[in-house]
Image (spheres, rainbow, N blue to C red):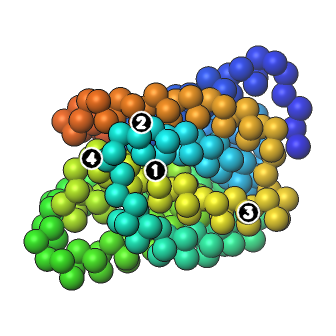
Amino acid sequence: MIDLIWWQLVALAAVGVVSGFLNILAGGGSLLTLPLLIFLGLPPTVANGTNRVAIVVQNIFALKSFHRSGVLSWRLALLCSVPAVIGAVIGAQLAVEMDDSLFKQVLAAVMVLVLLLTTFDPARRFQGCFSDHPRLRSILLLVGFFVVGLYGGFVQAGVGFLILSVVLMVGLDLVQGNVLKVVVVLILNLPALAIFAWNGQVDWLVGGVLAVGNACGGAMAARLAVLKGHHWLRRVVTLVVLLCAVRLFLA
């Protein structure tokens, strides 16, 4: 839908590497790519749909690395994916029906909300408090991942932080949480991408270039996540939150 010159394509792929790395280790990569796609000339709703191409490809490559490591629980991942997909279909449909000017305003508000949530982290006080209550834990996972899907289908940016908040509350560590995040985000974005594509809101060339970068960054991050473990990831999550906060304040 837009014509980019070679250096813009190179810059897009480079930002994709950074975005893919951040998305797999913590979240927030789309807080970089969505504004960039809009800056390059894509309408906001098309940027929202195009970004999903990179997210899907990135998570496929990361999933291969996590699967080989043996830390992936398919049963838990598929259980969480069911409500997430239902939410994603609703969220994506809301997004494609929204006009560009309104979506731009909503996106700005969402990014500020993500900033507040990641800065103050209200879920932190409940970390692990549901791990000894199986029934409440199951309810939280189902409701939490429906909300994750609804938000992820609508805008995607910052959905990783939301997923990590849910999984930490039920007692999973960050390595397990990141693996679960990769599977759920991949699965919920498949129907979301299909809805955006059906409505003509995907630029496949731009999405493909971004996907190359995201895939490289995601594959590298998946290996680091397993090798470095929980405590190293905690520092990365903190750093990503701070970087995203600075990016939002300067935007």
Residue at mark 3 to residue at mark 1: CA–CA distance: 19 Å
Task: Report the amino acid beneath label 2.
Answer: Ala
Asked whether the beta carbons under mark 4 and mark 3 sit within 8 Å of each other, the answer is no
Residue 226, can we see it? Answer: yes
Q: CA distance from mark 4 to mark 3?
A: 30 Å
Residue drawn at x 34%, y 58% is: 73
The foreground one among 111 and 143 is: 143
SS state under label 3: helix
Going from the N terminus, do you reach mark 2 or mark 1 first?
1
Report the quarter where the C terminus lies.
top right
- Crowding near pointer 4: few (<14 within 10 Å), some, many (20+)? many
Which residue in the structure is indicated by mark 3?
194
At mark 2, the secondary structure is helix
Instruction: Give the Cα separation between the discs numbered 2 and 1.
Output: 9 Å
Q: Position of residue 7 (x, y in %)?
A: 76, 17
Q: Residue at x 46, y 50 (%)?
A: 182
Q: x, y percentage for residue 5?
A: 85, 21
Q: Could you tell me if the residues under marks 2 and 1 are in contact, i.e. CB atoms within 8 Å? A: yes
Residue at label 1? 182
Q: CA distance from mark 4 to mark 2?
A: 12 Å
